[in-house]
Image (spheres, helix red, strand yellow):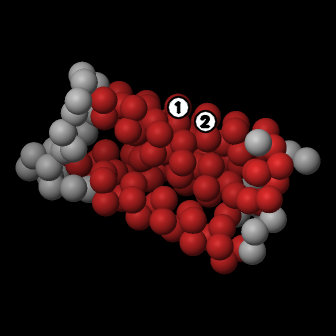
Amino acid sequence: MKLFFQRITRLPFWLRLLFFIGVSGVLLIAGLRAQPIPEAFAQEDKLHHFIGFLALSFSCRLAFRRVRLIWIASGCLLTGILIECAQALMPLRTASAYDALANGFGVLIGLLIAWYWVRD
């Protein structure tokens, strides 16, 4: 598994950037939909937030390896907060502190995973 992630980090910058843009686009489209995504079980959206921001922070770290972790974490957290604020302004959506917390945990775990595999 480590070899797989080492190969990913050696991909050309434009390819890593494309992966990051794709993850960001999916996250924004899902977060700014007019209606919430239907849930199969209670609080499923927290899982979506966690996984989405894990993928965002991980792909951001892979794409921008020379940027300090604090800036990547701050940018990802700010993105999550801004999406929650935008949802508060939509008629069928609501902002949630728990969603923002799930975003934060996703960012933290995503950066920890990226740090573990990219540290060499």
Image: 24 above or below 80: below
**Left or right, 48 with reference to 118:** left
Q: How many marks?
A: 2
Mark 1: few, some, or many residues within 10 Å (few <14, many ≥20)? some
The Cα atoms of the two marked residues, 2 and 1, are separated by: 5 Å
Q: Quadrant of the N terminus?
A: top right
Q: Is residue 106 visible?
A: yes
Residue shown at 38% from the left, 38% from the top: 48
Q: State which quadrant residue 41 falls in.
A: top left
Which residue type does callout 2 highlight?
Leu
Q: Measuring from the top left, give residue 95's x and y in whole percent.
A: 25, 39
Q: Measuring from the top left, give residue 115's x and y in whole percent.
A: 76, 43
Q: Measuring from the top left, give residue 28's x and y in whole percent.
A: 36, 58
Image: 57 above or below 45: below
Extreme residue in the bottom direction? 14
Residue identified by numbered label 1: 105
Name the disc covering residue 108, or none: 2
Which residue type does callout 1 highlight?
Phe
Q: Is residue 97 visible?
A: no
Mark 2: few, some, or many residues within 10 Å (few <14, many ≥20)? many
Q: Measuring from the top left, give residue 118's x and y in whole percent.
A: 81, 49
Residue shown at 65% from the left, 73% from the top: 15
Residue shown at 47% from the left, 50% from the top: 78
Q: Do the CB atoms of the residues marked 2 and 1 lie less than 8 Å apart?
A: yes
